[in-house]
Amino acid sequence: DWTMGAYREEAIQKIRDQVGDAKVICGLSGGVDSSVAAVLIHEAIGDNLTCVFVDHGLLRQGEADEVITMFRDHYNIPLIHADERDLFLGELTGVSDPEVKRKTIGRLFIDVFQKHANEIEGAAFLAQGTLYPDVIESVSFSGGPSVTIKSHHNVGGLPEKMGLKLVEPLRELFKDEVRALGRELGLPQSFIGRHPFPGPGLAIRCPGEITPEKLDILRKADAVFIDQIRKHGLYDEIWQAFVALLPVRTVGVMGDGRTYDYACAMRAVTSVDGMTADYYPFSHDFLGETATRIINEVRGINRVTYDVTSKPPGTIEWE
Ligand code: XMP
């Protein structure tokens, strides 16, 4: 793609001009945006870039390994793997309010990131995969009050506190352009096409209090749902798909015994930018087959529902 090829060269030159010989740190979430930003910056300044990947224990099945393998082994980008699962899950014990969850995770994320970033001597810049829509969304609509529905966590305020300047090489791009740039940079399609995943991770897909047991059940059910979607060739038609584990147990029957286990909700939506969304019209066959697989393969769930709420009035995530 000629346009993206030219954009890539231009962006690399801009990063070199801005950063010079200084060191840059980049928080890696495993999402497309921060990954593309990291690979682009690595191409511009090589090992003057160090990435920090914080595992908060709220990732999906296999996700941490995928990210680490890709960046360390495939791209050879210096990467600090901060395994902070115990810290996050410890602090989230007893927390059930969605906004308190987000704020707790956001605060810990900044602490942990700062702690590890301090180990990188001479770091002068912080890289972020901020996109154009993020820039716009942080500006309130003129003429009306600005309403916060969910306080998305980011590293706002961190750069000043750490005395770092920001590098945001994706600031002019939309999501589809970031994906095109990622392709241009040689990131595998399986990675580029991945659905967005929220910073607070599975915490906001597990309404109510989070426990390691619930997270374990949720991860397994989510993996089955995504596997079904891939097997039916639907992954790329869907903006986001996941399972939410409901904080309620229901009665069921299995063999000749009574069960009393969790209910879960499958959620899949189409969207252009995440601001509005429609639920995905799966066939009844697909829904039935997937429900059966989840109940058979995941111990702890005995009832499966499908969320048919669009946004608005629903939001994509359950919290
Ligand atoms: P909602 O649920 O608000 O989600 O319709 C819109 C998009 O934003 C993602 N999302 C988040 N991303 N931190 C994030 O980084 C958050 O706290 C957060 N909450 C929602 C959501 O996954 C969807 O893509």
Image (cartoon, grey):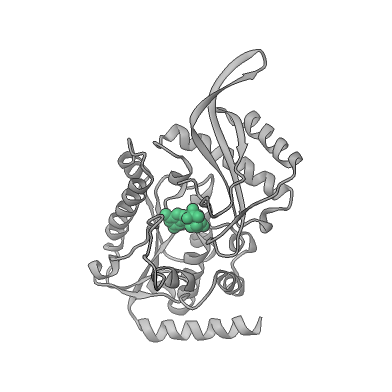
Quadrant, the N terminus: bottom right
- Is residue 156 shown left or right of residue 71? left
How many labels were placed on the picture?
0
Q: In the drawing, does residue 107 fall left or right of residue 232?
A: left
Where residue 109 sits: x, y (%)?
33, 54
- Give above or below for 230 relative to 16: above
The residue closer to the viewer here, 16 or 158, is 158
| Residue for point 39% across, 87% down | 17
Horizontal side of residue 284 vs 115, given as left or right: right
In the rendered image, the vertical position of residue 162 relative to residue 221, given as above or below: below
At x 45%, y 32%, the residue is 213
Query: Does residue 217 appear anywhere in the picture?
Result: yes
> Quarter-wise, where is residue 158 in the image?
bottom left
Tell me where residue 64 appears, x and y as whole percent. Answer: 48, 51
* Residue 253 place in picture, x, y as percent: 63, 18
Q: Nearer the viewer, residue 317 or 215?
A: 317
| Residue farthest front in this picture | 143
135 or 72: which is nearer to us? 135
Q: Is residue 251 above or below residue 238?
A: above
| Rendering coords of residue 197 (x, y %) | 51, 55
Residue 197 visible at all = no
